[in-house]
Image (spheres, rainbow, N blue to C red):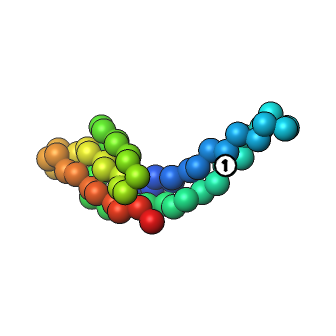
Amino acid sequence: MKGSLTHYNLINSGETRSIIYQVLGQHQCETMIKVNALTVDEKRIIVGGFDETGRGVIEIWKLG
């Protein structure tokens, strides 16, 4: 296993002043051993980093 990313929805509970963590999804990094960049929008997660040979790689995961 190279690593994994978990996508959370953080919900602020105003009454109890606590935060509720809701897991929306989990993704495995298959090709990279070092992550250097991460961006997220409504439709996808994009991760950039390096593989075992030092070459740059990008993984794009669709959400939902």
At 45% from the left and 55% from the top, the residue drawn is 4
- Counting from the top left corner in percent of width and height, residue 44 is at 35, 55
Please indicate, yes or no, whether residue 48 appears anywhere in the rendered image. yes
Which quarter of the picture shows residue 61? bottom left
User: Quarter holding the C terminus?
Assistant: bottom left
Q: Height in image: 29 above or below 18?
A: below
Q: Position of residue 3 (x, y in %)?
A: 42, 54
Q: Residue at x 78, y 36 (%)?
A: 14
Pick out the residue farthest to the right. Answer: 16
Q: Residues within 10 Å of mark 1 (few under 14, many from 20)?
A: few
Residue 29 seen in the current view: no
- Amino acid type assigned to the residue bearing label 1 in the image: Tyr
Q: Residue at x 66, y 49 (%)?
A: 21
Q: Nearer the viewer, residue 53 or 58?
A: 58
Q: Does residue 52 appear to the left or right of 12 in the view shown?
A: left
Left or right: residue 42 versus residue 58 is right
Residue 26 % position (x, y): 49, 60
**Which quadrant holds residue 49?**
top left
Residue 62, compared with residue 10, is above or below; it is: below
Helix, strand or loop at disc 1?
A: strand
Residue that badge 1 annotates: 21
- Residue furthest toward the top? 17
